Image (cartoon, helix red, strand yellow):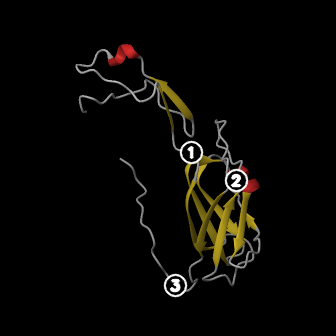
Amino acid sequence: TATNELVFSPAVGFEPATDYSATVLKSILAKAEKDLGLDVDKIKFHTPYLKAENVEAFWTKSRDDGQSTAMLKVNFNYPVNPQELAKVLVVTDEDGKQQDFQITQSGALANVLVKLKNQSNASGKSFKITIEKGLSMPNSTFETSEELSLETTLPDIKTLEIIDVQHGFEN
């Protein structure tokens, strides 16, 4: 820490997607060895707002009928309610045609699986995922104030491609 740097450590962690303001009192600055000043009396900041960080497209075998099923995994920076996401989610193909989908998960999740319906011939097809404004998080008053959008391409169903490796244990 530099001699002209003030470190702020709150007693309780900050809430996600929340705006804050802090006021630095003159009495705190008076304790410094040098004469310090601030450009502003009130400092405004926020924790990261809710956003869809990325989307992954892949094929899986359906448990219902054993057929290949196109899936999307939408990854957020905070957990969301999948059923609330379903209300504001729009999936369109490369021609701009809206696609039918299904979300069956429940509970707060940061990674939400979206099953694309009727996509047996969709290998190599591009999709745009649009999340309309108004998506909220459990236990928070925050709602997205603007539309979020991501794009992805469904890989060739006959090509095995490893795009990511993650461990399943934390210690």
Q: Residue at x 72, y 75 (%)?
A: 65
Out of 171 and 81, give the one closest to the viewer: 81
Q: Quadrant of the N terminus?
A: top left
Task: From the image, tell me which residue sits under label 2.
Answer: 85
* Of labels 2 and 3, the one closer to you: 2
Counting residues from the start of the chain, the first of labels 2 and 1 encountered is 1
Q: Where's residue 121, x and y in %?
A: 69, 84
Residue 17 place in picture, x, y as percent: 57, 40
Instruction: Identify the secondary structure beneath mark 1.
Output: loop
Give the distance between the C-alpha atoms of the residues marked 1 and 3, in whole angstroms: 37 Å
Q: What residue is drawn where x is 74% and y is 55%?
A: 88
User: Who is closer to the viewer here, 18 or 31?
Assistant: 31
Query: Badge 3 is on which residue?
Result: 159
Q: Horizontally, is 132 left or right of 166 in the view?
A: right
Return the mark for residue 108: none
* Residue kind at label 2, given as amino acid type: Leu
Single out the mark in the foreground, 2 or 1.
1
Q: Amino acid at mark 1?
A: Tyr
As displayed, is residue 42 above or below residue 121? above
Q: Earlier in the sequence, mark 2 or mark 3?
A: 2
Please state which amino acid type lies under the numbered disc 3. Thr
- The disc placed on residue 49 is 1
